Amino acid sequence: MSQMRTTTLSDNGCSELDALLQTRVEQGDVPGVVAVIANRERTLYRGAFDTPADAIFRIASMTKPITSVAFMMLKEQGLIDLDDEVSRYLP
């Protein structure tokens, strides 16, 4: 089982995340995992279990995640609010 990790999270947090992801792979829930947690400044966690860290994955149906990120960026800029009525932006 291959594992690669680069982190700036606490050792305890990384260990727990490593254990969770490794367990899911061992139980057959997923064939392999590559996980990355980042903020604006840096990568906080990177882990790979039973697959190379630079593996290429097919990603389908990305509309919801992309829309969610765009919405949260607008929220962060104060241009939209979670409690706004949809009719304020769409006819």
Image (cartoon, grey):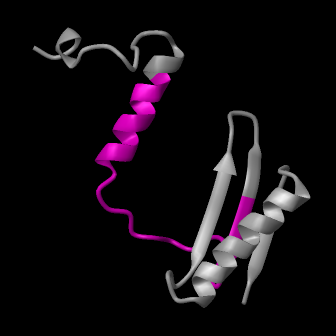
Q: Which residue occupies the foreground of this view, 15 or 4?
A: 15
Quarter holding the N terminus? bottom right
- x and y, in percent, of residue 9 in the image: 83, 51
- x and y, in percent, of residue 57 in the image: 46, 70
Asked whether, in this view, residue 31 is left or right of residue 9, the answer is left
What residue lies at 52% left-to-right and 89% top-to-bottom?
A: 28
Q: Residue furthest right?
A: 11
Residue 85 vertical placement versus 48 (above, below)? above
Membership of 49 in magenta stretch: yes
Q: Which residue occupies the foreground of this view, 16 or 59?
A: 16
Residue 26 vertical placement versus 71 (above, below)? below
Residue 48 vertical placement versus 64 (above, below)? below
Quadrant of the rendered image containing residue 54: bottom right
What residue lies at 38% left-to-right and 41% top-to-bottom?
A: 66
Residue 86 vertical placement versus 19 (above, below)? above
Q: How many numbered dots are placed on residues in this image?
A: 0
Q: Residue furthest left?
A: 91
Quadrant of the rendered image containing residue 16: bottom right
Residue 51 shows up from this direction: no
- x and y, in percent, of residue 56 in the image: 50, 71
Q: Which residues are magenta?
A: 46-73
Residue 68 shows up from this direction: yes
Quarter holding the C terminus? top left
- x and y, in percent, of residue 48 in the image: 68, 73
What residue lies at 64% left-to-right and 85% top-to-bottom?
A: 50
Membership of 67 in magenta stretch: yes
Asked whether, in this view, residue 48 is left or right of residue 68, the answer is right
Asked whether, in this view, residue 4 is left or right of residue 74, the answer is right
What residue lies at 45% left-to-right and 35% top-to-bottom?
A: 69
